[in-house]
Image (spheres, helix red, strand yellow):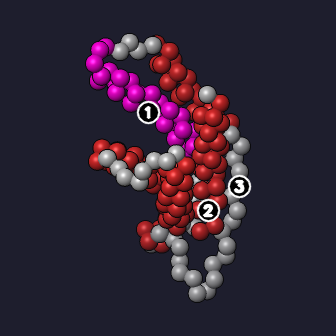
Amino acid sequence: MKLPVIFALLTALFWGLYGPVLGLARAAEQSPFKPYLLIGVAYLVWAIVGGAIGMKYTDVPFSFSSVGLKWGLISGSLGAFGALTLTLAMFSFPTGMKPRPEIVMPIVFGGAVTVTALTNLVMARSQAGAHETSPWLWVGIAGMAVCIVVVAYNTPHVKLPSPPPATPNSESREPMAESR
């Protein structure tokens, strides 16, 4: 059980750094979509390289069942849509307000844990036989909601670097609706 816990902790570390670093990328580019495009490139490269190395290491053939292919593409799409909606969450703060990863990330990860638990509950109930749900699941979900608020409220607010000054030849980076 040690290795799965180590990898889970590393995932928490990487994804916990994701929001603040995404904020730095957005501040540097003055666009949420330039970093998102690079996120896609990074996902593609690391998924292909990591997947190929893992398959070679475990001596798994490079062929896929139709069911595995379908669910693999669906899960990858869910991950990509999650990255897109995270980008939109960071981008959609009111005009003049900087992205706030200290607010967004607790909601994302606390919410993800809750969605995972509820999805597994629905899947377990759909299998043969009734499934008894522990009341502790609901206590945990309520506790998660409280923790999201406590963490978001008490996380230090870091000032992001100022964008580079506009050069005379650069295009305006203001959205059209705001330039009127």
Question: What amino acid type should be assigned to the residue bearing mark 2?
Answer: Ala
Q: Secondary structure at mark 1?
A: helix
Determine whether 8 is above or below 34 in the image: above
Q: Residue at x 30, y 22 (%)?
A: 127
Name the one closer to the observer, 173 or 114. Answer: 114
Residue with the mark numbered 2: 25
The part of the image, by quadrant, that contains residue 29 is bottom right
Q: CA distance from mark 3 to mark 2?
A: 13 Å
Q: Which residue is mark 3?
A: 159
Residue at the bottom extreme of this rendering: 169
Q: Which residue is mark 1?
A: 115
Q: Residue at x 46, y 13 (%)?
A: 135
Helix, strand or loop under label 2: helix
- The span from disc 2 to disc 1 (Cα, nearest Å) is 28 Å
Q: Quadrant of the C terminus?
A: bottom left
Q: Measuring from the top left, give residue 65's x and y in whole percent.
A: 31, 47
Q: What residue is shown at x 55% (from left), y 44% (from top)?
A: 104
The earlier-in-sequence mark between 2 and 1 is 2
Callout 3 secondary element? loop
Mark 3–mark 1 distance (CA, rounded to whole Å): 31 Å
Residue 125 is covered by the magenta coloring:
yes
Instruction: Measuring from the top left, give residue 28's x and y in whole percent.
Output: 63, 67
Judged by depth in the image, the label closer to the viewer, 3 or 1, is 1
* 27 is within the stretch colored magenta: no
Q: Residues within 10 Å of mark 3 (few under 14, many from 20)?
A: few
Q: Position of residue 18 (x, y in %)?
A: 60, 51
Segment colored magenta: 103-130
